[in-house]
């Protein structure tokens, strides 16, 4: 079990699931994305994203992160430009569905009318965060959190087993990972499932 220190909080994380980056699939995805989205567009694609450090976030008011840099380079090579706007995830998805954006960064196959590859263009690890003094030292199943309050980010994609698990005392969603981690630190949750 690794202890992480985020904004002064010591929190332990245990792996639940890991999706690994595949350069081949990422390039294939991005090639497919730029080729198909370029049809019928001017020279600029508009995209929305949510704060998901280190993949997509604002630094000094400018979009940055691993995902942002990957998309920028691929779009540049296609001869187009891309503009980004950061929004809460649910609003980003809603605005994309309404046609306000051409793309959603770091989406998944569950987003209608978006283009996705078999492997996402970036890696991530889904993790249960717990208090440092939690008796849970290693993830062995959801039953470790039976009759406990668990938090998660609303609108993100989680394993179906997690979303359907009935053993939790309750599940509450928040808008951002850091809000959930603060609620965990404040004792509102016994565990928080989030991305690393």
Image: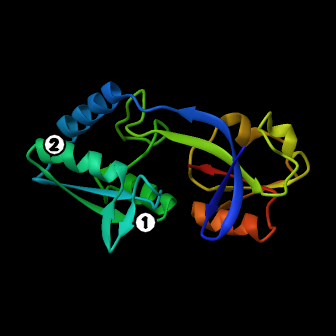
Q: Position of residue 130 (x, y in %)?
A: 76, 54
Q: Position of residue 152 (x, y in %)?
A: 67, 54
66 vs 87, nearest the viewer: 66
- On the question of residue 104 being in view, the answer is no
Say which residue appears at 42% left-offset and 32% top-offset.
21
Say which residue appears at 12% left-offset and 42% top-offset.
77
Say which residue appears at 57% left-offset and 53% top-offset.
155
Q: Position of residue 81 (x, y in %)?
A: 15, 54
Question: Up-down: is 151 above or below 143?
Answer: below
Q: Position of residue 167 (x, y in %)?
A: 87, 43
Q: CA distance from mark 1 to mark 2?
A: 23 Å
Corner quadrant of residue 4: bottom right
Mark 2 element type: helix
Q: Which mark is residue 38?
A: 2
Q: Which mark is residue 102?
A: none
Instruction: Say left or right for 47 vs 88.
Output: left
Say few, some or many: other residues with alpha carbon within 10 Å of mark 2 (under 14 / 14 to 19 / 20 or more). Answer: some
Say which residue appears at 80% left-offset and 67% top-offset.
188
Say few, some or many: other residues with alpha carbon within 10 Å of mark 1 (under 14 / 14 to 19 / 20 or more). Answer: some
- On the question of residue 110 being in view, the answer is yes
Instruction: Say left or right for 163 vs 89.
Output: right
Query: Which residue sits furthest right?
Result: 147
Question: Up-down: is 152 above or below 126?
Answer: below
Question: Up-down: is 34 above or below 48?
Answer: above
Instruction: Say left or right for 70 vs 18.
Output: left
Residue, disc 1: 87
Q: Judge depth for marks 1 and 2 and give the one in front.
A: 1
Query: Which residue sits furthest bottom?
Result: 60
Quarter of the picture containing the N terminus is top right
Earlier in the chain: of badge 1 and badge 2, it is 2
């Amino acid at each position: 079990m690794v202890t992480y220190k985020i904004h002064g909080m010591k929190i332990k994380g245990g792996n639940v699931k890991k999706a690994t980056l595949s350069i081949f699939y990422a390039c294939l995805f991005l090639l497919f994305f730029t080729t198909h989205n370029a049809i019928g567009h001017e020279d600029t694609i508009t995209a929305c994203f949510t704060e998901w450090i280190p993949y997509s976030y604002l630094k000094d008011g400018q979009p940055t992160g691993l995902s942002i840099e990957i998309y920028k380079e691929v779009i540049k090579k296609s001869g187009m430009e891309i503009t980004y706007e950061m929004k809460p995830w649910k609003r980003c998805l809603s605005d994309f569905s309404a046609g306000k954006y051409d793309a959603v960064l770091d989406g998944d196959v569950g987003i209608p009318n978006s283009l996705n590859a078999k492997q996402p263009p970036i890696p991530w690890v889904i993790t249960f965060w717990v208090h440092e003094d939690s008796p849970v030292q290693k993830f062995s199943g959801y039953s470790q959190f039976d009759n406990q309050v668990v938090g998660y980010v609303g609108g993100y994609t989680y394993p179906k087993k997690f979303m359907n698990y009935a053993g939790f005392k309750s599940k509450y969603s928040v808008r951002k990972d850091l809000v959930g981690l603060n609620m965990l630190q404040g004792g509102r949750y016994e565990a928080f499932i989030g991305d690393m």
